[in-house]
């Protein structure tokens, strides 16, 4: 008796709610569509206990000729999930590699516009959530550019250009001067 009461409460509430919606709807084409949708929702509420009692989805699977058993379905689902994770990881690695290559090309083009230094290398470091650090290795075009005031000004320009392209903060951008074989 308790189960029937628990089943009837949401159905009665849904019927009352459907009646309320019907009263407030204007007389137009939307009214008939809304009535149909509300009717389908009520039918769904009516059939819900039957699916639980009859274990309908499993019964449907077994009734199909040549259907596989539930344990096999579970194993196949686990295998499918593992394959999906592998595909996602492969796609993510490919995406990150292309994004890194694209970003490095953009940085090289932008930093190549400066005449005071020669760009030697741009290295991007990615971790879990995305780009974490950028290292820019440059070589001055003239030895007079190695004065600390000039280097400091050029560092600000380089960091500013990198920030515009990457949205990183200053602490995540490293500029190195005069290193030929940066690893």
Image (spheres, grey):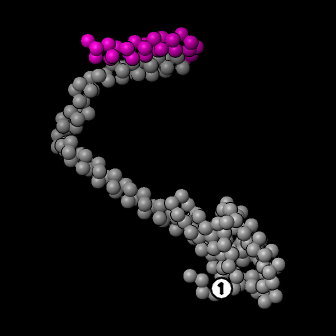
Q: Position of residue 93 (x, y in %)?
A: 47, 64
Q: Left or right? Give the position of 11 relative to 167.
A: left
Q: Left or right? Give the position of 128 relative to 120.
A: left
Q: Nearer the viewer, residue 71 or 138?
A: 138
Q: Left or right? Give the position of 43 relative to 107.
A: left
Callout 1: SS? loop
Taking the spot 29% from the left edge, 48% from the top edge, the residue there is 77
Residue 31 in sight in this render: yes
Residue 106 in sight in this render: no
Q: Which residue is mark 1?
A: 179
Position of the C terminus by quadrant: bottom right
Is residue 158 positioned above or below 3 on the image? below
Q: Which residues are magenta?
A: 1-29
Taking the spot 20% from the left edge, 33% from the top edge, the residue there is 59
Taking the spot 82% from the left edge, 88% from the top edge, the residue there is 144
Determine which quarter of the picture holds residue 2.
top left
Prevailing secondary structure of the magenta residues:
helix
Q: Position of residue 92 (x, y in %)?
A: 47, 61
The stretch drawn in magenta includes residue 120: no
Determine which quarter of the picture holds residue 82.
bottom left
Position of the N terminus by quadrant: top left
Taking the spot 78% from the left edge, 89% from the top edge, the residue there is 143
Determine which quarter of the picture holds residue 66.
top left
Q: Nearer the viewer, residue 45 or 156?
A: 156
The stretch drawn in magenta includes residue 13: yes
């Amino acid at each position: 008796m308790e189960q029937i009461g628990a089943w009837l409460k949401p159905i009665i509430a849904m019927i009352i709610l459907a009646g309320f919606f019907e009263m407030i709807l204007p007389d137009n084409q939307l009214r008939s569509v809304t009535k149909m949708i509300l009717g389908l929702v009520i039918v769904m509420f009516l059939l819900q206990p039957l699916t639980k009692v009859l274990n309908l989805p499993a019964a449907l699977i077994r009734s199909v000729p040549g259907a596989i058993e539930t344990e096999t379905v579970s194993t196949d689902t686990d295998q499918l999930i593992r394959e999906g994770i592998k595909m996602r990881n492969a796609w993510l690695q490919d995406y990150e590699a292309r994004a890194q290559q694209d970003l490095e090309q953009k940085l090289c083009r932008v930093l190549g516009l400066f005449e005071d230094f020669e760009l030697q290398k741009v290295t991007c470091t990615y971790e879990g959530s995305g780009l974490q650090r950028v290292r820019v290795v440059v070589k001055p075009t003239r030895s007079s550019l190695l004065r600390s005031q000039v280097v400091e000004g050029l560092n600000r320009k380089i960091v500013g250009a990198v920030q515009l392209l990457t949205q990183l903060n200053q602490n995540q951008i490293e500029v190195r001067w005069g290193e030929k074989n940066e690893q």
